[in-house]
């Protein structure tokens, strides 16, 4: 999910895209594939009450983590091959270009809060794994089990199905029939075209938020529990600056969602913001970012939302079976509530 928020002199505006969320002080845009919770309004109210754009994106994502948006964000979702839920998150300050991120975070629910602590309490950008958990505990975050009855049931069913689907390839025993343990095959098999197999869009999602303030300040944040049944330690695009989201107060912001293993190879959020910096309109920037990936992975699952500092916004998505439109929401001072919009995929 992603969300973009920007506040103009006429008042704040919010746009939300399914699967993304990004807020700004004057205007807000949000995208969330299956998640329709109070987090969007929570971010919006943060801006209305005088909070910063960083406060808005953090609190919006944190609310989604608490509400376990569509199971793809927060605790109790997307168990990995060991049955454990781990979290990834990122936050970016478009004024200073500072970034804080965590990945493979264990036993701490507020991943985006930990990411902000990385940005504000260290000289680093990215902390991962058990070390990220230790850092979070030292910063006062509560350590607790992220599993729920639902995530345990998902994992148990997966084991009963011989660990199908999974993300292994070029290993033995045959990963399409067995749970392993796996060993590398002597010879690698290379497909003629780059097509992902067994990809389920519902197993990949993110909340991403972009916010733009009255003076053009831009912030972005993301949070996710990653891909269901992922190999332990896997990190997708969401916590990677320029992939999951990007913010630059001289140009705007962007946030992406979809198959993170593919999308992170192209840094679509950075590309879109850079295109807007050079004069491209948000919709054009979004479509160009999607087209760049589509050239190599024509069947990939993904979408992106883009917003510039003057209030323009757009979105784009790759058309594939079962995915022909990308929904997003808009909130502005006139309606003061979310309005659903859609963009046709291409």
Image: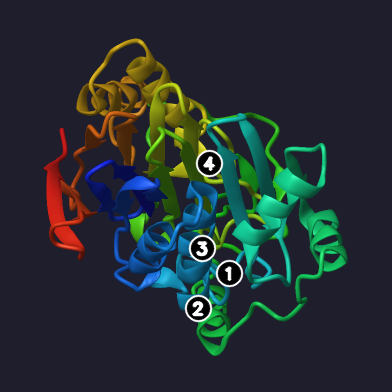
| The C terminus, quarter of image | top left
Residue 46 percent location from the top left of the image: 44, 62
Q: CA distance from mark 2 to mark 1?
A: 7 Å
Check whether the beta carbons of the residues at disc 2 and disc 1 lie within 8 A of each other.
yes
> Nearer the observer, disc 3 or disc 4?
3
Q: Which residue is mark 3?
A: 59
Res 148 seen here: yes
Above or below — where is 169 with respect to 273? below
The residue nearer to you, when weighing 99 against 230, is 99
Q: CA distance from mark 3 to mark 1?
A: 24 Å
Q: Which residue is rendered at x = 82% and y = 63% of the image? A: 139
Q: Which is nearer the N-term, disc 4 or disc 1?
A: 1
Q: Which residue is mark 2?
A: 154
Q: Is residue 120 above or below residue 241?
A: below
Give residue 157's mark: none
Q: Secondary structure at mark 1?
A: loop
Q: Are marks 4 and 1 in contact (CB under 8 Å)?
A: no
Q: Nearer the viewer, mark 2 or mark 3?
A: 3
Q: Nearer the viewer, residue 99 or 168?
A: 99
Left-right relation of 246 to 135? left
Q: Which of the two labelled residues, at mark 2 and mark 1, occupies the earlier sequence position? A: 1
Q: Which residue is mark 4?
A: 237
What whole-number distance in Å separates the C-alpha atoms at marks 3 and 4? Answer: 21 Å
For residue 79, which numbered disc appears in the image?
Answer: 1
Q: Is residue 158 left or right of residue 341?
A: right
CA distance for labels 2 and 3:
28 Å
Q: Earlier in the sequence, mark 3 or mark 4?
A: 3
Circle nearer the N terminus (2, 4) = 2
List x then y, in percent, for residue 216: 40, 32
Mark 3 touches mark 1? (CB < 8 Å): no
Dot 2: element: helix
- Front tag of 4 and 1: 4
């Amino acid at each position: 999910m992603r969300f973009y928020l920007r506040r103009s002199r006429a008042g704040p505006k919010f746009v939300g895209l399914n699967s993304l969320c990004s807020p700004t002080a004057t205007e807000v845009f949000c995208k969330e594939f299956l998640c329709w919770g109070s987090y969007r309004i929570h971010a919006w109210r943060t801006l209305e009450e005088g909070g910063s754009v960083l406060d808005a994106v953090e609190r919006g994502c944190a609310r989604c983590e608490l509400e376990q948006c569509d199971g793809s964000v927060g605790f109790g979702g997307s168990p990995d091959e060991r049955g454990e839920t781990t979290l990834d998150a990122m936050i970016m300050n478009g004024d200073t270009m500072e970034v804080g991120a965590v990945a493979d975070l264990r036993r701490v629910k507020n991943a985006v809060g930990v990411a902000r602590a990385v940005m504000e309490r260290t000289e680093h950008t990215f902390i991962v794994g058990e070390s990220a958990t230790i850092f979070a505990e030292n910063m006062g975050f509560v350590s607790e089990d992220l599993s729920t009855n639902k995530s345990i049931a998902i994992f148990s069913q997966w084991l009963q199905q011989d660990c199908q689907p999974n993300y292994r390839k070029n290993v033995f025993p045959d990963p399409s029939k067995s749970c392993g343990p796996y060993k590398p095959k002597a010879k690698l098999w290379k497909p003629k075209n780059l097509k992902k197999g067994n990809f389920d869009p519902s197993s990949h999602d993110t909340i991403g938020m972009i916010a733009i303030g009255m003076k053009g300040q831009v912030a972005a944040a993301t949070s996710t529990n990653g891909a269901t049944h992922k190999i332990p330690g896997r990190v997708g695009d969401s916590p990677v600056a320029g992939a999951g989201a990007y913010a630059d107060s001289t140009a705007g912001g962007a946030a992406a969602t979809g198959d993170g293993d593919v999308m992170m190879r192209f840094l679509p959020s950075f590309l879109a913001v850079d295109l807007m910096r050079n004069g491209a309109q948000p919709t054009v920037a979004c479509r160009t970012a999607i087209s760049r990936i589509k050239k190599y992975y024509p069947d990939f699952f993904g979408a992106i939302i883009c917003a510039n500092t003057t209030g323009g916004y757009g979105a784009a998505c790759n058309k594939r079976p079962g995915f022909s439109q990308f929904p997003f929401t808009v909130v502005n001072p006139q309606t003061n509530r979310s309005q659903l919009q859609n963009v046709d995929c291409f």
